[in-house]
Structures are given as C-alpha cells and as structure tokens.
Image (cartoon, grey):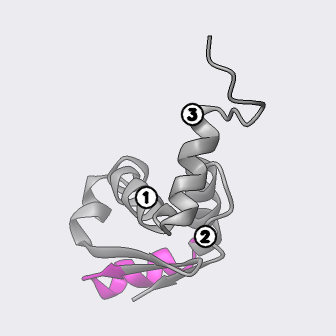
Amino acid sequence: MDNRGNNQTTLKEALKAMLEHYKLKGKLNQSRIRHQWEEMMGPSIANYTRDIKLYQGKLFIIIDSAPLRQELSYGKEKIKRLLNEQLGEEAIQEVIIR
C-alpha cells in the first residue's frame, strides 16, 4: 500500500484548483452561459443574440434588435440572478446589453 501522507484531495477540489491556477474559470463560465442562454431565454431571443462574453464579472450581451435590447435592459437584474443560480456562484456582478 502506498503511504504518501495526508495531502489527499478530492477530484472536485483538484479540478477547481486547476481552473483557478490556469485562469480557465471565466472561460468555463462563459461557455456554460452560452449553453444555457437559449434554454433560459427562448429561441426567439437567442436568434437575435450575436454574442455573449463574460469579462471580469461583467456579462456583455450583444443583441441585434434595438427594441429587444431595450426590453432586456429592464430585466438585467433578473438575468444576472438566473445565470448566477445556474452557475452556482456569483460570477456575474453586472449585465451590460449592447
């Protein structure tokens, strides 16, 4: 049997440490947000969404339709809350719709 001491970690802890060390957590969260966007907002809004980027706690949502952009701007806090719930953490501090 192998005696390596008490420096055992779970796979979850090891993956979390790796994501933080290589600064991949933001990219992973961005990918998860893009994946959830159509399911959360529906296909009609997803069709008008050109891009979604997460950068330093700010979620940038690029919308092609001015009326839809205006309508979504009223629900920025709800969008932030729902996406943070999906991510299981407070990764998004601000939603910016352009």
- Figure label count: 3
SS label for mark 3? helix
Q: Nearer the viewer, mark 3 or mark 2?
A: 3
Q: Which residue is mark 1?
A: 28
Please tell me which of labels 3 and 2 falls first in the chain: 3
Q: Element under label 2?
A: loop
Along the line of sight, the residue nearer the viewer: 10 or 28: 10
Res. 11 mark: 3
Where 58 falls versus 42 (above or below)? below
Q: How far across and how far down the image is residue 34, in percent?
A: 35, 59
Q: For the N terminus, which image quadrant?
A: top right
Q: Nearer the viewer, residue 70 or 48?
A: 48
C-alpha distance separating marks 3 and 2? 25 Å
Sort mark 3 into few (<14), some (14-19) or many (20+) by Cα contacts within 10 Å: few
Q: Residue at x 64, y 48 (%)?
A: 88
CB within 8 Å, label 3 to label 1: no
For the residue carrying disc 1, how many other residues have a C-alpha within 10 Å: few (<14), some (14-19), or many (20+)?
few
Residue extending furthest right?
6
How many angstroms separate mark 1 from mark 2 (CA)? 13 Å
Q: Which mark is residue 92?
A: 2
Question: Residue sitting at 43 percent across and 50 percent down?
Answer: 40
Q: Is residue 96 left or right of residue 94?
A: left
Indicate the amino acid at tag 1: Leu
The span picked out in magenta is 62-75
At label 2, the amino acid type is Ile
